[in-house]
Image (spheres, helix red, strand yellow):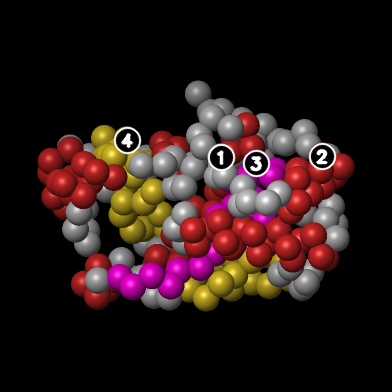
Amino acid sequence: MTQTVPQTTAGAHEIRETVERILSAESLPPIVQAGHPALRQRAAEFDGQLSADQLHRLIGIMRQVMHEAPGVGLAAPQLGIPLRLAVLEDQFNVDPEAAALRNRSPLEFLAILNPRYTPRGEGLASFYEGCLSLNGLQAVVARPEAVLLEYLRPDGVPEHREFFGWQARIVQHETDHLNGILYIDRAQLRSLSSNAEYAAHWAEAGIGRAQDGLGFDAGPAGISAG
């Protein structure tokens, strides 16, 4: 049975209050974990709920939280803020063999508002991915290899940009957060592994060994299989 993802009921005042609490705190906010309602609701479109200064400061805090986690992306709902805002950045040093197989190249810092992506072409890529809101776990997800992303920059200017490979995966993962979707909704659940077990048994550039050992295929699964 298809489930309908509920729309957040948070209004502009509630969103501003949540953001102000984060901005005025003496420490960085925690990343909320699976089960928090903000992760399972469609976030509100950004339409001026925050001032330019508030938005700028919030983006800065989100970038700090992402770096300290560490991760390559963070969506506002992961801080309990039901707003269509995410930050992305991938500057990790990755083994060249793994980077080549995963088509992974550095992604400069990017803040996106109201993003929507459209797959480009029919190609899919299947790799393990994790999430800062499902701490300690990862699973294989098949995602389009290339997407077109439409979004607003923080200064309100609309943009559209194509992303490929691992960058496309990051874009999809973070945009999914804003639609109340977690990667496990699209994952091959037989591939689900703790970080420790993944490191002990399945750590490699691809997923072949895990496929054989855990018994899953590389195709779309969950809500992506319909």
- Disc 3 from disc 2: Cα separation: 11 Å
Was residue 92 drawn as part of the magenta stretch in this picture?
A: yes
- Disc 2 from disc 1: Cα separation: 18 Å
Residue marked by disc 1: 32
Nearer to us of marks 4 and 2 is 2
Q: Earlier in the sequence, mark 4 or mark 3?
A: 3
Mark 4 vs 3: CB contact within 8 A = no
Q: Which residue is painted at 56% across and 56% down in the image?
A: 65
Q: Is residue 124 above or below residue 164?
A: above
Q: Which mark is residue 80?
A: 3
Amino acid under label 1? Val
Mark 2 vs 1: CB contact within 8 A = no
- Disc 1 from disc 4: Cα separation: 22 Å
Q: Earlier in the sequence, mark 2 or mark 1?
A: 2
- Expressed as whole percent of the image width and height from the top left, the position of residue 222 reads 41, 36
SS for dot 2 = helix
Mark 3 vs 2: CB contact within 8 A = no
- Expressed as whole percent of the image width and height from the top left, the position of residue 101 reads 25, 68
Residue marked by disc 4: 189
Q: Earlier in the sequence, mark 3 or mark 1?
A: 1
Amino acid under label 4? Leu
Q: Which residues are magenta?
A: 73-94
Residue marked by disc 2: 14
Q: Which residue is painted at 61% across and 58% down in the image?
A: 62
Q: Earlier in the sequence, mark 3 or mark 2?
A: 2
- Expressed as whole percent of the image width and height from the top left, the position of residue 74 reads 55, 55
Is residue 43 visible in this depiction of the protein? no
Amino acid under label 2? Glu
Q: Which residue is painted at 51% across and 37% down in the image?
A: 33
Q: Earlier in the sequence, mark 4 or mark 2?
A: 2
